[in-house]
Amino acid sequence: DEIRALRTKGIYTDDEKSKLRCSHHNPEITRVYEEYLGEPLSHKAHELLHTTYKQRLLYQK
């Protein structure tokens, strides 16, 4: 649990220092939508960016 807490603290610290904290403020992401995906939640964006979850059996050695 100590390692998990340190990792979480590090992630939050890095996030606070980041210039781009929201993806919709990222000019590269904006350009991808303008030039290729269209608008957020478009069919193409959903098709390419969204994933589905499939439960798998645990790996057995």
Image (cartoon, grey):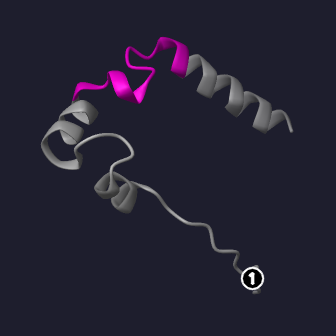
Identity of the amino acid at label 1? Answer: Leu
The single residue placed furthest to the right in the displayed view is 1
Number of marks in the rendered image = 1
Q: Is 31 or 12 nearer to us in this picture? A: 31
Image quadrant assignment for residue 5: top right
Q: What stretch is highlighted in magenta?
A: 15-27
Label 1 crowd bin: few (<14), some (14–19), many (20+), radius 10 Å: few
What residue is drawn where x is 62% and y is 67%?
A: 53
Determine if the magenta segment contains residue 23. yes
Give the residue number, with chain letter if any, for mark 1.
Answer: 57
Depicted 37 relative to depicted 43: above or below:
above
What residue is drawn where x is 55% and y is 66%?
A: 52
Depicted 59 relative to depicted 44: above or below:
below
Q: Is 59 or 31 nearer to us in this picture? A: 31
Give the percent coordinates (x, y) of residue 17.
48, 12
Give the percent coordinates (x, y) of residue 43.
33, 56
Give the percent coordinates (x, y) of residue 41.
39, 46
In what quadrant of the picture does the C terminus appear?
A: bottom right
What residue is drawn where x is 70% and y is 79%?
A: 56
In what quadrant of the picture does the N terminus appear?
A: top right
Q: Is 57 or 27 nearer to us in this picture? A: 27
Q: Is residue 4 left or right of residue 14?
A: right
The single residue placed furthest to the left in the displayed view is 35
Circle 1 SS class: loop
Give the percent coordinates (x, y) of residue 9.
69, 23
Q: Is residue 29 left or right of residue 49?
A: left
What residue is drawn where x is 84% and y is 34%?
A: 2
Depicted 51 relative to depicted 59: above or below:
above
